[in-house]
Image: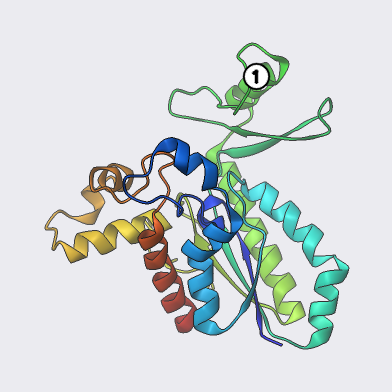
Amino acid sequence: MKDILITFGDSWTFGQGSAYEDGMTEEEYERIYLDPEICWKNGWRRHVSEHFDFDNINLGCGGSSNDKQFRLAKQFFSSTKFKNILKSGVQVYVLWGTTSVNRYDLWVNEENAYRHIFLNTVNDDPIIPDQDEGTAIDQIAGVLNKYSYNEIARVKELELEFFHWNQYFKMLGVKNFWYDSFCSFNYNVKLSNFFDHQKRIRRDMLAVIVENDRVLKKSLVPSWCVDDFAYAVDHNMLNPYSFHPKADGYKQIADHLIKKMQEHM
């Protein structure tokens, strides 16, 4: 049996956007952009798995919050499937991409499910996908956004999760690594298994592909002066319909993660 790589994260882990090809219409893109086979083929997980000869189990999904990933992890690591993997004797690796702390999961009794919302947005109003203004959920989100959301507190909660999961994986003999998938924060904790942790800012995967492009073009503009998203859009590095990397961008992310895993393994 092959060793196993378990991946966590958001749409950048799933490979969303990689189906886009130059000249594709939005209608053509919408038909295939969530196709799991295409996202596997063009995303970074395939490249990393093939490089190390791993089998991949992916729990990363589009729009996911950190909280959702922690819930999925607790479900998976308590499952019979995972217990059988441990019994098989293969080495298990976990590659976990953190995302923005302003992604928040609100439990809705009426729907018996979590509703994904974005707090502390640019205009200070929460964003609730597929939710009309003035509804009860919209009002609750507004109250949370105004009176409860605090980025510093959310980052501290995330730091506690780092510590918890590191201890858990160490106990099981699982080799785990963290990296910033989407959005970077200044963490107070220092973790030897957190990729690019010595960098204070600009270490998420968008920063990786932007910096690669700047190096290739021998840019003289200091990195701290660069707005990664604006640069990526201006230089046609993201697909124009969902602003995720194209296939070549995911290959660059794969190369970066392979290099970092080799350094830490």
Say what amino acid the circle numbered 1 marks. Answer: Asp
Image quadrant containing the N terminus = bottom right
Of residue 243 and residue 263, the one placed in the foreground of this image is 243
Image position of 78 (left or right of 103)? right
Pointer 1 residue: 138
Name the outermost residue toward the top: 134
Q: Measuring 56% from the left and 56% from the top, which residue is drawn there? A: 14
Task: Look at the image and tell me whether residue 265 can be seen.
Answer: no
Where 144 falls versus 53 (above or below)? above
Quadrant in which residue 201 is drawn: bottom left
Residue 67 location in percent, x, y?
68, 48
Where 29 falls versus 92 (above or below)? above
Disc 1 secondary structure class: helix
Residue 8 location in percent, x, y?
62, 60
Of residue 18 and residue 72, the one placed in the foreground of this image is 18
Residue 192 location in percent, x, y?
52, 74
Q: Measuring 45% from the left and 76% from the top, which residue is drawn there? A: 258
